[in-house]
Image: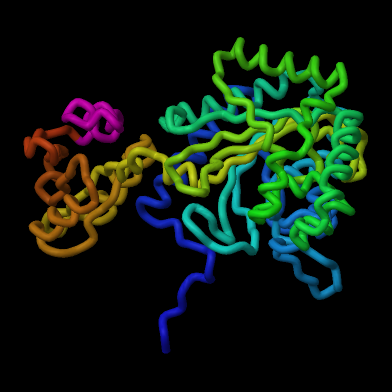
């Protein structure tokens, strides 16, 4: 029987990959907390309408990429392709629309049926932040500042550029939409089949087209900035001035329209050139109408999401394997006494492993492979005397430690013998 492989587009997180993943998520979680964001966890599958309503029937995600299925009761369910819609659904169904603003951080797996490539999987992982219930440009700037701080903490901020655009308010978008319809209608014979459909349902989608002929037409299409209302212009100016106040550099990129239906005003992406064509590592924008689509009131909101796999690839180096204290029994000591010491060290917050079996030489070899910082020798003689040998692996030096000190202040014992990480 052939070995069963992971499903195409999925991957195991083991060893270095897992350490990179955990480092990205824990770093993001910590800094989100500094900004007052609380973590939410929504189900990984939802009623299909959560995503079909919010993402739009003309989006590639809904039309081509969602993993949808019928359960035994005939209900249409979908593995979540992104996190924002689920957060908005949770805001409504948990009765939190009267307790605004809500600042939400999330992390977890997402699912899209697309061609696997570098940094892109069919099951992938995202971190995200949503600031729900704040209409001011300051909220947009703060969400972007949080993203930038996370990238800085990960050591990758110098490798990314913040690109910024505006989609204006409703009146601006309607005027722009009319201009786009008029423009693209003159090139129906040159548009791709997908873009002809988009022209009827949502012409802004044409701006996302990857078709080469479409791209050539998009280059000369009407610009949003030409159709901004006075209010939208004021919002756009305020946002940029606030980002200047935060000291966050950006470049204006008028082609960032985002691929989802619920965005307005701010759209942005943090992009890099270090990952080839998969250059976007964090992206988001303002979506003032999404909560209303979930059955709630209109709630002004801003948020972003970032791919953990792509951020992991940007890390200079994987976090090191955590060091442990390894207990090596010598001879045939009393197991109960050994176990008592083992558990006492763990209760004091020391990472401890035990050498299960084998000769002393083999156990020491294994301790080296376990990246041990110290070896604690526990034999019949040591237990009888109430004094134990501790070997510092880096220097090879040994010291003797009393039973009482080991069980009362283990961290100080190992720090004093050269391990400052405990």
Q: Residue at x 53, y 71 (%)?
A: 7
Q: Main secondary structure of the magenta part?
A: helix
Front-most of 37 and 195? 195
- Tell me: 177 left or right of 317: right
Give the residues drawn in magenta, as a range: 403-422
Q: Residue at x 16, y 30 (%)?
A: 417
How was this image coloured?
Answer: rainbow
Residue 228 sits above or below residue 177 on the image: above
Q: Report if residue 344 is visible in the image.
A: no
Residue 277: where, in percent of width, then height? 51, 49
Front-most of 245 and 167? 167
Residue 265: where, in percent of width, then height? 78, 28
Picture quadrant where residue 306 is located? top right
Q: Residue at x 83, y 33 (%)?
A: 288
Residue 167: where, in percent of width, then height? 78, 31
Q: Residue at x 37, y 36 (%)?
A: 349
């Amino acid at each position: 029987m052939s070995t069963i492989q992971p499903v195409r587009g999925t991957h195991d997180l083991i060893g270095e990959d897992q350490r990179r993943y955990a480092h990205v998520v824990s770093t993001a979680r910590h800094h989100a907390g500094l900004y007052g964001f609380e973590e939410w966890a929504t189900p990984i599958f939802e009623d299909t309408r959560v995503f079909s309503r919010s993402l739009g029937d003309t989006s590639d995600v809904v039309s081509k990429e969602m993993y949808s299925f019928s359960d035994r009761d005939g209900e249409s369910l979908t593995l979540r392709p992104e996190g924002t819609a689920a957060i908005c659904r949770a805001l409504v169904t948990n009765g939190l629309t009267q307790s605004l603003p809500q600042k939400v951080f999330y992390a977890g797996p997402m699912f899209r049926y697309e061609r696997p490539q570098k940094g892109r999987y069919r099951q992938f992982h995202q971190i995200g932040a949503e600031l729900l219930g704040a209409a001011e440009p300051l909220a947009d700037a703060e969400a972007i500042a949080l993203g930038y701080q996370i990238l800085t903490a990960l050591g990758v901020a110098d490798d990314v550029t913040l690109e910024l655009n505006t989609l204006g308010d409703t009146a601006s978008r309607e005027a722009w939409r009319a201009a786009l319809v008029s423009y693209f209608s003159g090139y129906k014979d040159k548009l791709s089949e997908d873009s002809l459909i988009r022209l009827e349902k949502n012409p802004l989608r044409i701006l996302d087209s990857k078709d080469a002929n479409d791209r050539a037409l998009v280059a000369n299409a009407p610009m949003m900035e030409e159709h901004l209302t006075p209010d939208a212009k004021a919002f756009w100016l305020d946002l940029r001035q606030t980002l200047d106040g935060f000291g966050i550099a950006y470049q204006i990129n008028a082609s960032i329209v985002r691929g989802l239906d619920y965005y307005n005003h701010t759209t942005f992406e943090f992009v890099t050139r270090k990952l080839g064509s998969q250059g976007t590592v964090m992206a988001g924008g303002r979506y003032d109408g999404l909560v209303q689509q979930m059955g709630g009131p209109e709630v002004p909101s801003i948020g972003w999401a970032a791919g953990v796999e792509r951020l992991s690839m940007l890390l200079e180096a994987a976090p090191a394997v955590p060091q442990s204290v390894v207990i090596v029994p010598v001879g045939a000591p009393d197991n109960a006494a050994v176990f008592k010491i083992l558990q006492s060290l763990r209760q004091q917050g020391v990472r401890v492993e035990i050498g299960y079996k084998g000769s002393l030489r083999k156990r020491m070899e294994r301790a080296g492979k376990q990246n041990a910082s110290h070896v604690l020798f526990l034999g019949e003689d040591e237990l009888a005397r109430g004094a134990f040998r501790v070997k510092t692996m880096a220097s090879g030096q040994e010291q003797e430690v009393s039973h009482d000190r080991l069980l009362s202040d283990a961290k100080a014992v190992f720090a004093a013998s050269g391990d400052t990480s405990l």
